[in-house]
Amino acid sequence: MTERPERRPYRRAGEEKRREDLIAAAMELVSEGGPEAATVRAIAARAGVTAGLIRHYFSSKEDLTNAAYRQVMDQMTAHALRAIETIPAADPVARLAAFIAANFRPPVMTPVSVGVWAGYMHLGRSDPSLHETHEATYLGYRDRLQELIAALPRPADPARDRREAIACNALIDGLWIEGGSLPDSFAEGEVLRIALDGIAAILGITFPASAYHSDQRKTG
Amino acid sequence: MTERPERRPYRRAGEEKRREDLIAAAMELVSEGGPEAATVRAIAARAGVTAGLIRHYFSSKEDLTNAAYRQVMDQMTAHALRAIETIPAADPVARLAAFIAANFRPPVMTPVSVGVWAGYMHLGRSDPSLHETHEATYLGYRDRLQELIAALPRPADPARDRREAIACNALIDGLWIEGGSLPDSFAEGEVLRIALDGIAAILGITFPASAYHSDQRKTG
DNA sequence: CCCGCTATTATTCAAATGTATAATTCATGG
DNA sequence: CCATGAATTATACATTTGAATAATAGCGGG
């Protein structure tokens, strides 16, 4: 009959595990309800811990959410870069196709990714560190795209390549946003097909039929 | 020596004027710092009134911010539609060009418009009324774009028109977002040129040189 | 087996937020 | 010129938020 105040039992987890869990929880919440839904208490609850633990691993809530944003962006670019690693440089069209296709399948085009991006994109205005991450990610992606375009077998023209990289990047972004936020409005593989057709038209090239199958890994 | 508590002097303004001011204030704040910056007190301060007045004109803060979002979207589509009113239906290429160009000049492509769109786009997930507005605006815009594409002088093909409308819409969206959020990264008229070139390539048409001048009104 | 370290929980706090209500002051009509 | 009512301000309140601090329990080393 001792009325001992029951304290929630717990198990210790390594620092990396806890940080991962907290970042993942923040990501999910931001993607679902925007930054205002990612309160310290909601994040902690989703991660299965109590709120106080957040400030044990992060100096502030902003520190945590910035880490979440950065991780989402890094994961997406890393995934796109990994997709072209296996394609030989001798086939620039296939490399470009693989790069494009990587944007339109998980884990890049998912409601979570698009939601996090949307939730945080306007914060770049006020938060300098976040703005830096945003701009660096955007320009880095576009530069990589321009490199792939410049490698195409056609007369060199850097100014044209820049304009076409901007156009292709915008097309990819727009389709990624729409496909990620309104996933039910498109048939399986439809977004990828529209992207490849559009980019082929912009660049004046033709992608092989194999590029239109999103399971690019299997065809390698 | 009467210690009368000084009450802020004020002048009465009509209901429409006050609603306009409050909506404009909410728009600006959302575009600058996202929805979380648009508190009732901040909105009231920006509009030059006190916080209590908001609930005199709107049933809730959500009601006000929804009105702001709706107004931004309606203004943009109305502007784009107004741009093609003066172009005769006999010239579908010019109509399409005018519609496109309207998206890349004020008041459509501005940091405020893009900021409001970005700030609210993820709220569509949680708020049903906002989601309805978002989807209706998006599909309405795309349908109108598809109509303009279908009117082009070429063999009819509805399925192709749909895909190309999706692609052109995505390209416009992506460029609009980038041009609005990173205005210093593009030269004067560069975004419009890239958009017209890209859409011309996607549709297999050519826009006249006059379409590349954003002051479309003067050339009419 | 026990002791100390720290990861984790629990509690507390001040500030901010949306909302509700009371108190006034501006305008308008007679 | 005054009275009536609505527009506007001012104040109060309950809730939530991020943060700070105190308490405790899991876990590894001796």
Image (tube, coloured by chain):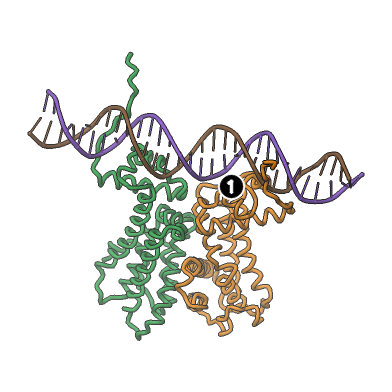
Chain colours: A orange, B green, C brown, D purple
Q: Which residue is mark 1?
A: A62
Instruction: Pick the residue in front: B43 or B126.
Output: B126
The image position of residue C15, as x and y in percent, is 51, 35
Q: Position of residue B128 (x, y in %)?
A: 41, 60
Q: Position of residue A113 (x, y in %)?
A: 56, 63
Q: Is residue A141 left or right of residue B74?
A: right
In the image, A82 versus A39, the foreground residue is A39
Q: Chain of mark 1?
A: A
Q: Residue furthest front?
A: A1
**Res B56 visible:** yes
Seen in the picture, residue B122 relative to B151 is either above or below; the reply is: above
Q: Residues within 10 Å of mark 1 (few under 14, many from 20)?
A: few
Q: Residue furthest top?
A: B1
Q: Is residue A45 left or right of residue B126?
A: right
Q: Quadrant of residue B51?
A: top left
Q: Amino acid at mark 1?
A: Glu
- Residue at position x 37%, y 82% from top? B158
- Quadrant containing the C terminus of chain B is bottom left
Look at the picture and state if A212 lies above or below A115. Answer: below
Q: How many marks?
A: 1
Instruction: Give the position of the N terminus of chain B as an image quadrant.
Output: top left
Which of the two residues, B187 or A111, is positioned nearer the viewer here? A111
- Visible residue check, residue B187: no
Q: Nearer the viewer, residue B198 or B208?
A: B198
In this picture, residue B212 sits left or right of residue A165: left
Q: Residue shown at 52%/54% (left/top)? A: A120
Res. D8 image quadrant: top left
Q: Circle 1 sits in a helix, a strand or a loop, which is it?
A: helix
Q: Identify the residue at image location x=38%, y=70%.
A: B142
Residue B186: give x, y in percent of width and height.
47, 59
